[in-house]
Structures are given as C-alpha cells and as structure tokens.
Amino acid sequence: MSLLYENARALTAAQDKRLTFFGMSGLGKTHLANLLRDEGSWFHYSVDYRIGTAYMGEHIADNLKRQAMQVPFLAKLLLSDSIYIGSNITFDNLAPLSTYLGKPGNPDLGGLSFAEYMRRQDLHRRAEINALLDTPQFITRAHDLYGYSNFVCDTGGSICEVVTPDDPRDEVLKTLNTQTLMVWIEGSEDHTENLIRRFDRAPKPMYYQPRIMRQLWDDFKRERGVAATDVVPDDFIRFAYARAIRHRVPLYAAMARNWGVTVKAEDVATVRDAKDVIALVAAALEGRRESA
C-alpha cells in the first residue's frame, strides 16, 4: 500500500504535513498531537471529541437528563425549562462519553442490562466510523477556515475494532491513508501490563467488537458462576480489558504493516517538541523503506 509520504525527505519537505496517530490509549497519541498543536501551525482533530459532541452528544445529554428526572427537585426544574443539563466534554476530559457507554451488570451497582449496554456499544461503533470518515472534511476546514497548513488526527484506542486491516477496500483505512500518514505507537509487553494495572485502579467503559464482547460476557458469568443481574460492573470491565487489550495488538500491527509506519512508545516518551515528533516519524518512514 503506497503512503502519503514515501520517505523521510518527502515528509520533512511537505508544506502541508498530515499525520494520524493510532494505538492503545495511554501510550502517547494525544501527547504527540498536543506537541504539534502547541507549535502553532497544526490543527488537532480529536476523534473521541468528535464522537462525544457531533455523534453522541444528544445521547449523552439525554442520559444525564434521565438521571436528573429521577430526582423530584431537578425534574420539576427541567420540566419548566428552568435549568440546563449538558456534558462538558473536552479533549482532555472524555468522561461524559465513557460514562454514557456504561457498564453491564447489577442495576443496584449502576450496571446496565447487557442488551442496553450492547445498544450503546453499537451507537459508539457507528459514531467512531463516522468521526474517522470526517477526517478529510476537517483537513479542508482547518485549512480554509482557520489557515492551518498542518493537520494531526488523534484517534481513539478502539479504531482497530471498527476496521479490517487486511482489507484493501476498507473505507476508513482507505480514507485515512489517502489523506494522512498513519503512525502506530507500538507498546511493549511491559507497557501493556502497566496499562492493565492503571485500568484496574480506575476502570472505565470502552468499546470492543460485538463478537468479542459477547464472548467475554459469557466467559465472565461462567467463570464466576453468576447471573447477569449479579455481575459487579467494575469487575466485569476489568476482566474484559485485561483480555481484550491483547487482542488489539495484532490488529494495530496489521494496520501499520498495510497502511502506515511504526514508532516505539519508549521513543515517544523522549519527544519534547514538534520538531522531535517529525524527526521520529521521518525515521519510521526510513525504517519502513529499508525493510521493504
């Protein structure tokens, strides 16, 4: 698969550099995007922010209102249009989106029915695909409206769940590949273990492929010997994360092999400014060319 920039020289010489970072959450995608944005000539497109505002915003707001309607004092104010309830989602705080996705299990512990949980997962899947396909629109918007010559797409960790890396016809990957250079931030096994430990301390809802999620749900209930309504929501999503996160690695690897380049997470940790980011990606391009 041809890339937007065939070698390091093409990237460094380009007047309109366009990059897409992908990989596990927590390995530095947003860090690199922020460094580029801080340089002053880069537009930062956050896919998760786009999902939570353009495509899931109404669902998130309605869920907040549904909770408020259970409190008589707030319900009266809502019904009289005396108060406004909405999410304050930002690039750095995506909690409203993850809170809406929720966790399946015991309703007394805040759990959703598995059917409702999967309905919300499906909404997220469609929203993520749409947000990724919006990338060309935002490249044009960044240039024509704001005058940015450079563009960075900061994807969510679940991008690998909504594409088929080995399919040359995949609409999302074709779109990103023709418009940007795709860059995988590859973590080590130590990184994976650290991410699992961090997730255990603060578990949050995530999106996974429906087939995988259903299998994890069945496996959890069988291994723990519990009914669906007795599942502790946090216990399940910890269980799911530790198993599903490893299933993502070969998907990311295939995306990089077929559609982009790879940088190491340990090298990302040493980057300090936009110049370093471009040098890191340029080296990855050279490495890909030499191994071809």
Image (cartoon, rainbow, N blue to C red):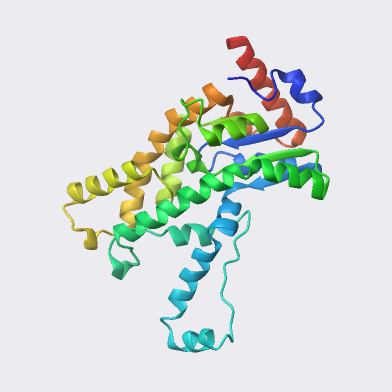
Q: In the image, residue 126 lies at what x, y percent?
A: 48, 49
Comparing 51 with 167, the one in front is 167
| Residue 155 makes an appearance in the image | yes
Comparing 79 with 232, the one in front is 79
Would you place residue 285 above or below residue 247 in this image?
above
Across the whole image, how many numbered discs are drawn on residues? Answer: 0
The image quarter containing residue 274 is: top right
In screen coordinates, is 242 left or right of 263?
left
Q: In the image, residue 96 lies at what x, y percent?
A: 52, 62
| Residue 201 makes an appearance in the image | no
In screen coordinates, is 78 left or right of 277?
left
Comparing 56 with 91, the one in front is 56
At 56% from the left edge and 25% from the top edge, which residue is drawn? 259
At 67% from the left edge and 16% from the top edge, which residue is drawn? 286
In screen coordinates, is 249 left or right of 292?
left
Q: In the image, residue 27 lies at what x, y percent?
A: 55, 38
Q: Quadrant of the N terminus?
A: top right
Q: Quadrant of the C terminus?
A: top right
Q: In the image, residue 17 lies at what x, y percent?
A: 75, 32
Would you place residue 274 above or below residue 56 in this image?
above
At 55% from the left edge and 32% from the top edge, which residue is drawn? 173
In screen coordinates, is 213 left or right of 71?
left
What residue occupies the far left of the structure in this picture? 225
The image quarter containing residue 137 is: top right
